[in-house]
Image (tube, rainbow, N blue to C red):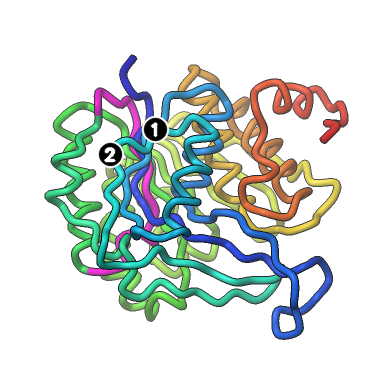
């Protein structure tokens, strides 16, 4: 069967410090995988969608770990390139501090030619974040190629600016990512990111966007379309690690959207997915399958 969703972006090996210990003092780490588009890919795959992840990894143990992790969740990694000359990026973090090690990584060598050759396999939706475009000029061209393929095939474009100032000055984010934001059909963004990029839901809806989902500082998520606005308070009851909540909201929302749900229903699915993720320690651990998400939406406790 054809792919439903294509994501493009870097996956990194994650080393997460033991609970309650500052990174500078940590001696024991949990190994996992992290990456904005990877999180969304796994989230959608667990919810029953056919997802293809496009990227590059190094020909190293971390690259093999990334591929094995995604295969275990039925994410299609058949078009991922393995680079014999570059390494797989990694990050080390606790719940508040993070060190990125990705300069010159295999994913930073993404290219437009690679994206065009990989293709979309009939996907209805593509998802990418601003992080990918900020990795390098070549990676930015790869994102541009993805947008072009989507337009040519009639696929919708989902975009999350996912601003990380360690990757560049705000001016560079506005220059590199600001224009991509205005070309997306579905936008997932933080309130502060919109302000930094000089946009509002209204200006985006006046352009290409059909839906803008805003994560507000007060933890309320709001979906805005030309037909109205819907708000969803946070459903979080327990926080073990806040990282990954935004990607979980995106995957929950997109899954409901792909099934024809209303913005209100999709927001609630996204909020429930985010609540499950922050109750666990890694980006991927708490992403629910459809049964777990249904239980969460019904207000019952999920036994892990």
Q: Is residue 166 left or right of residue 207?
A: right
- Foreground pick, 247 / 178: 247
Drawn side of residue 214 relative to residue 204, left or right: right
User: Does the residue at mark 1 contact the one at mark 2 (Cβ under 8 Å)?
Assistant: yes
Residue sitting at x 31%, y 32% = 156
Category of crowding for the residue at label 1, using alpha-carbon neighbours closer than 10 angstroms: few (below 14), some (14–19), many (at least 20)? many
Toward which corner of the image does residue 97 lie, by quadrant? Answer: bottom right
Residue 197, percent from left and from top: 39, 66
Residue on which the image places disc 2: 79
Vertical placement of 11 versus 19: above or below? above
Residue 228 visible in the displayed image: no
Q: Quadrant of the N terminus?
A: top left
Residue 151's tag is none
Residue under circle 1? Answer: 76
Q: Position of residue 244 (x, y in %)?
A: 61, 53
Residue drawn at the location 38% of the way across and 31% of the way down: 5
Above or below — where is 255 with respect to 40?
A: above
Query: Local crowd at mark 2 within 10 Å, few (<14), some, or many (≥20)?
Result: some
Which type of secondary structure does the marked residue at label 1 adopt?
Answer: loop
Q: Residue at x 14, y 42 (%)?
A: 116
Q: Nearer the viewer, residue 5 or 86?
A: 86
Give the mark count: 2
Distance, label 1 to label 2, CA atoms, is: 8 Å
Tell me where the magenta segment starts and ends, as one range: 121-136
Query: Quick check: 17 above or below 231?
Result: below
Q: Nearer the viewer, residue 210 or 7?
A: 7
Q: Nearer the viewer, residue 177 or 102?
A: 102
Residue 128 is covered by the magenta coloring:
yes
Q: Is residue 5 left or right of residue 256?
A: left
Quadrant where the C terminus sits is: top right
Classify residue 185 by image quadrant.
top left
């Amino acid at each position: 069967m054809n792919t439903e969703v294509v994501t493009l972006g870097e996956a990194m090996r994650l080393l997460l410090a033991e609970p309650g210990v500052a990174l500078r003092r940590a001696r024991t780490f949990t190994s996992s995988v992290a990456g904005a588009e990877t999180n969304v890919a796994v989230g959608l795959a667990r919810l029953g969608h056919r997802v293809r992840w496009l990227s590059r990894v190094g020909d190293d143990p971390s690259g093999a770990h990334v591929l094995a992790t995604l295969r275990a969740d039925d994410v299609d990694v058949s078009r991922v390139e393995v680079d014999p000359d570059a390494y797989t990026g990694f990050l080390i973090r606790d719940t508040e501090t993070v060190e990125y090690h990705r300069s010159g990584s295999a994913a930073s060598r993404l290219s437009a030619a690679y994206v065009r050759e990989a293709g979309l396999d009939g996907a209805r939706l593509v998802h990418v974040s601003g992080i990918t475009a900020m990795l390098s000029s070549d990676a930015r061209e790869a994102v541009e190629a993805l947008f072009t393929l989507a337009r040519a095939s009639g696929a919708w474009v989902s975009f999350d600016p996912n601003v990380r100032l360690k990757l560049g000055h705000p001016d560079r984010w506005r220059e590199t990512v600001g224009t991509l934001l205005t070309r997306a059909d579905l936008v997932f963004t933080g309130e502060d990111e919109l302000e930094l990029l000089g946009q509002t839901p209204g200006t985006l809806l006046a352009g290409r966007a059909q839906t803008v989902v805003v994560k507000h500082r007060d933890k309320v998520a709001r979906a805005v379309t030309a037909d109205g606005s819907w708000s969803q308070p946070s459903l979080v009851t327990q926080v073990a690690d806040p990282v990954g909540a935004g990607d979980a909201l995106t995957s929950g929302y997109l899954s409901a959207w792909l099934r024809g749900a209303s913005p209100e229903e999709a927001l609630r699915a996204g909020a429930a997915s985010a609540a499950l993720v922050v109750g666990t320690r890694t980006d991927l651990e708490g992403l629910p399958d459809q049964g777990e998400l249904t239980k969460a939406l019904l207000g019952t406790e999920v036994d892990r």
